[in-house]
Image (cartoon, helix red, strand yellow):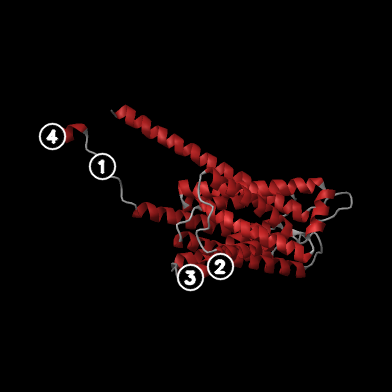
């Protein structure tokens, strides 16, 4: 009996290992490619005349249009209802803050380098904690505030001590750095509200993840399309991508990997939990910074290296502490008596 049981256990471990490889490779590949494409589209000129693509809201529209179409197909394939579960205005609220989040993210790349932006994203713990306290009435421990402070300190060191003059591909100068940091602050604030309100929506309604993605991205499509028309940027963006086919290819690939990343993120959280996902995302951010520095020749000062160590060391320490705490609170499985002891006790 022991041999079949051990083979089942080994089979389950091997199955979980392959699931882990699938999740990690999916998240790392899609999000790292997504980050590189972001920087390429917003910071690298196209064509002989070296023209920059400046219509960040058009990128938001393309991304949301692709994601809403895929999520609609997923709902139809799984035979789930397309009716909204929550009031439509709540989906729209998430859409508005999500559009503002993504627009600030793209616009910031005009003024700060991708490594600065990626590391600054690690500081989203503070706005998430603030919004969690205000919206969800959550309470956080002192260690959480300590990690948030260390991450913010590391990000500040990384931003304040750049190497070289790589600030903006448009106009170099400290005022652009300040504007880029302001955009990143807007990104963090809007993103913290979006994720917190999404969490509240999931807990308040019996909602499928594809349902929320579909209606949120559908509202985002309408809002971003309206914004493009009101700003008069729709036709210039279309003219730009029609003249520069390589830019059109980059945008199509960006929308594809953005949609695929949503699937891998949902799969990872559902299969392995939030702690494993947090560790993977931290590793992905580190990999994105390293790849961007190599690909786009971003120099790093020694102060920035110290800031990176502070940020990622704090995040990994928090993940490790939470994992150890979870293993201590989880009761051990009941030990099964050997066969001969079972026979004696039954007799």
Residue holding disc 1: 335
Residue that mark 4 sits on: 344
Mark 2 or 1: in front is 2
Among numbered discs 4 and 2, the one appearing first in the sequence: 2
Seen at 60% across and 66% down, the residue is 190
Return the residue found at the far bottom: 134
Dot placed on the residue nearer the N-terminal end, 4 or 3: 3
Q: Which residue is mark 2?
A: 127
Mark 1 or mark 3, whichever is nearer to me: 3
Residue 100 or residue 282, whichever sits in front? 100
Circle 3 Cα neighbour tier, 10 Å, few/some/many (<14 / 14–19 / ≥20): some
Label 3 or label 2, whichever comes before in sequence order:
2
User: How much space separates mark 4 and mark 2, taking CA atoms?
Assistant: 61 Å
The quarter of the image holding the N terminus is: top left
Quarter in which the C terminus is drawn:
top left
Distance of label 3 from label 2 (alpha carbons): 10 Å
Could you tell me which secondary element the residue under label 1 belongs to? Answer: loop
* Label 4 secondary element: helix
Residue ID for mark 3: 133
Marks 4/1 in contact by CB < 8 Å: the verdict is no
**Seen in the image, is 338 located left or right of residue 12?**
left
Q: Quadrant of residue 189?
A: bottom right
Tell me the element at label 3: helix
CA separation in Å, label 2 and label 1? 44 Å
Q: CA distance from mark 1 to mark 3?
A: 41 Å
**Front position in the image: 122 or 54:** 54
Q: x, y (%) of residue 299? A: 73, 54
Crowdedness near tag 2: few (<14), some (14–19) or many (≥20) residues, C-alpha within 10 Å: some
Residue lying farthest to the right in this orientation: 49
């Amino acid at each position: 009996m022991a041999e079949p049981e051990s083979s089942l256990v080994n089979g389950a471990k091997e199955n979980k290992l392959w699931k882990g490889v699938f999740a990690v490779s999916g998240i790392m590949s899609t999000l790292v490619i997504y980050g590189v494409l972001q920087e390429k589209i917003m910071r690298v000129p196209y064509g002989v005349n070296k023209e920059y693509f400046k219509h960040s809201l058009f990128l938001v529209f393309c991304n949301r249009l692709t994601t809403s179409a895929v999520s609609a197909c997923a709902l139809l394939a799984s035979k789930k209802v397309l009716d909204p579960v929550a009031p439509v205005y709540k989906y729209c609220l998430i859409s508005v803050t999500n559009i503002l989040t993504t627009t600030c993210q793209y616009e910031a790349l005009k003024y700060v380098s991708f490594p600065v932006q990626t590391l600054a994203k690690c500081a989203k713990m503070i706005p998430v904690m603030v919004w969690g306290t205000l919206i969800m009435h959550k309470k956080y421990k002192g260690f959480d505030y300590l990690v948030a402070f260390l991450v913010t300190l590391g990000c500040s060191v990384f931003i304040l001590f750049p190497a070289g003059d790589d600030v903006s591909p448009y106009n170099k100068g400290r005022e652009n750095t300040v504007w880029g940091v302001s955009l990143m602050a807007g990104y963090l604030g809007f993103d913290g509200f979006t994720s917190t309100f999404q969490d509240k929506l999931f807990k308040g309604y019996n909602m499928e993840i594809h349902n929320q993605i579909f209606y949120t991205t559908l509202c985002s499509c309408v809002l971003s399309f309206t914004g493009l028309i009101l700003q008069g940027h729709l036709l210039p963006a279309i003219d730009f991508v029609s003249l520069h086919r390589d830019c059109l290819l980059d945008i199509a690939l960006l929308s594809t990997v953005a949609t695929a990343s949503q699937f891998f993120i949902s799969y990872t959280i559902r299969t392995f939990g939030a702690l494993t996902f947090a560790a993977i995302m931290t590793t992905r951010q580190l990999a994105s910074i390293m790849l961007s520095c190599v690909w786009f020749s971003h120099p790093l000062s020694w102060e920035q290296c110290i800031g990176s160590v502070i940020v990622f060391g704090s995040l990994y320490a928090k993940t490790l502490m939470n994992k150890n705490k979870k293993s201590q609170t989880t009761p051990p499985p009941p030990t099964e008596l050997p066969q001969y002891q079972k026979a004696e006790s039954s007799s």
